[in-house]
Amino acid sequence: MVVHGAGIIPGVKGNTFNKFTVLKKLGAGSFGELFTGINNETHQPVAIKVEKKPTAFPQLHHEYMVYRSVLPTEGFAKCYYNGHNRHMQLIVMDLLG
């Protein structure tokens, strides 16, 4: 899928991808950044994981495939969207915790 959104990293906050809007940065790690977001149709809070492109060791698409392989299993977050553009890869999933 291709991310349909106006924003690119570093200005991810406030941008809309598909039907999800990025609200607040929660943190960052070696492979990307984590944001809270909202589903604009259902108003459900979501987590949005973003990985910059290009990256030496892409992880996010693989992570998405692992989530898909174990669902629906209790205790795992449900993924709602997986997309990319030339600047980033992202997945939208349940906001846990």
Image (tube, rainbow, N blue to C red):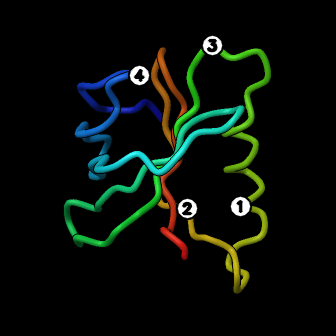
Q: Which mark is residue 67?
A: 1
Residue 87 coordinates in the image, percent (x, y): 47, 17
Horizontal side, residue 42 vs residue 17: left or right: left
Quarter occupied by residue 74: bottom right
Horizontal side, residue 68 vs residue 79: left or right: right
Q: Residues within 10 Å of mark 4 (few under 14, many from 20)?
A: few
Residue 67 coordinates in the image, percent (x, y): 71, 61
Instruction: Judge depth for marks 1 and 4 and give the one in front.
Output: 4
Residue 88 coordinates in the image, percent (x, y): 50, 25
Q: Which mark is residue 79?
A: 2
Q: Secondary structure at mark 4?
A: loop
Q: Earlier in the sequence, mark 2 or mark 4?
A: 4
Mark 1 and mark 2: Cα distance apart in space: 7 Å
**Residue at position x 51%, y 61% in the image:** 93
Amino acid carrying mark 3 in the image: Pro
Q: Secondary structure at mark 2?
A: strand
Q: Earlier in the sequence, mark 3 or mark 1?
A: 3
Above or below for 96 versus 56: below
Amino acid carrying mark 1 in the image: Tyr
Q: Which mark is residue 54?
A: 3
Q: Earlier in the sequence, mark 1 or mark 4?
A: 4
Horizontal side, residue 36 vs residue 96: left or right: left
Quarter occupied by residue 2: top left
**Residue at position x 23%, y 25% in the image:** 6
From the image, tell me which residue sits under label 4.
9
**Residue at position x 39%, y 56% in the image:** 36
Mark 2 and mark 3: Cα distance apart in space: 23 Å
